[in-house]
Image (cartoon, grey):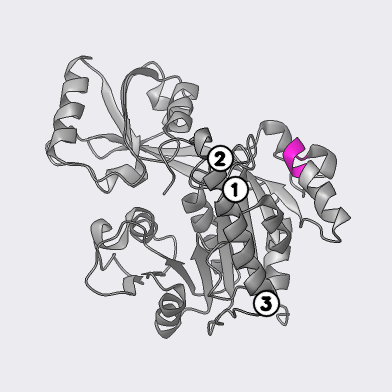
Amino acid sequence: MSPARPIPALAPLGCLYLRAAALRNALFDRGAWRAERAAAPVLSIGNLVAGGTGKTPAAAWLSALLAGEGRRVAIVSRGHGGVRASDPLLVRDGGAPRATAREAGDEPYLLAAEGAAPIVVVGRRRTAAAALACAAGADAIVLDDGFQHRWLARDLDVVLLDAADPFGGGRGLPAGLLREPPAGLARAGLVVLTRAPAAMLVPRPLERAEWPAALAALEATLRARGAELPQVVAAAHEPATLALPDGRMDAPSALAGRDLVVVSGIARPDAFAATLEGLGGRIAARLDFADHHRYGAADARAIVSAAERVPGSLVVTTAKDANRWPAGAPVPAVLRIAFRVPAEQAVRAVVRRALFPGAA
């Protein structure tokens, strides 16, 4: 979970945090600490910063890519924020979710409810969760938010970076958003620039001249050390569908010209609001809550009050928030976001080489 905002005054703590992360990575890199291998190939998806790069739709997209390779896919996640009696927990095994959003956590429940993969498992120990996924019949694993969680060995690390600010301001937690030094990207097998501008959305890996300046500078530093970055591709998060309060589905463009009461408990509420404005919606009120916020009765009253102040307005929220929507609040419209990677064939080739090198 990301902090509400970076705290630059805590820069010394941020430096200590990054040094500790670098030491931890060195212990793995040098073999002092050893990761445990699962019975199925593992594709890890993660990031360098705390929250907000769009891992959930990316996990669904990569799961679909693996399913297209004929694999029975499991998504394995820590299940952040979930409160459960048993751990690890099998959230989905081919049918409807077997756990609630409160038990599984927001993102794993959403992935299970939307059928992103036939198997979804959450667990604080990712090695145990992966073992449970394999026991359920998985022959490929997508490890959600796994870049820094190195006790489970992986065959490919896919790292998401925000195209506009790849390193979250450059400071370590809690002064900034970095979870480890940017040089850690050298162990990635693929970098995906998310929320990329249109000029980057090309059907091929990006040339170095097309990279953000911060990423190009890091590449130069790594090359001086004898390392380098992997292929870099661009992706977009695009509005896909709009579920209306009466249950009907509509195009996101149906928001054009509507007065909106925007409710979200996500890492980057400004990005969600900007998406709604880009669709032509008029934001009459915003209720921004912390990422993974658990809605309660007071929140329901606040949403009711905001909607009543704007007669005829439409309450809009995210798919993640809809799964923990408070009783007593107006039924919201739910905007779902799709992940699009124009360089899909390049990504598929990287995945095949890393996970299935012996496949025909």
Q: Secondary structure at mark 1?
A: helix
Observer-nearest of 185 and 38: 185
Q: Range of the magenta residues?
A: 211-216
Residue 12 lies in magenta, yes or no?
no
Decide if residue 111 is on the left or right side of residue 71.
left
Tell me which amino acid carries mark 1.
Cys
Residue 249, position in %: x, y? 34, 38
Observer-nearest of 256 and 189: 189
Residue 282, position in %: x, y? 38, 16
Residue identified by numbered label 1: 15
Is the residue under label 2 in contact with that under label 3 (CB below 8 Å)?
no
Q: Secondary structure at mark 2?
A: helix
Earlier sequence position, callout 3 versus callout 2: 2
Main SS, magenta region, reads: helix
Which quadrant is the C terminus positioned in?
bottom right
Residue 339, position in %: x, y? 54, 46
Tell me which amino acid carries mark 2.
Ala
Image point (68%, 58%), residue name: 184
Earlier sequence position, callout 3 versus callout 1: 1
Decide if residue 207 is on the left or right side of residue 338.
right
Image point (49%, 75%), residue name: 72
Is the residue under label 2 in contact with that under label 1 (CB below 8 Å)?
yes
Q: Is residue 107 above or below residue 206?
A: below
Tell me which amino acid carries mark 3.
Phe
Decide if residue 32 is on the left or right side of residue 308.
right
Image point (77%, 48%), residue name: 204
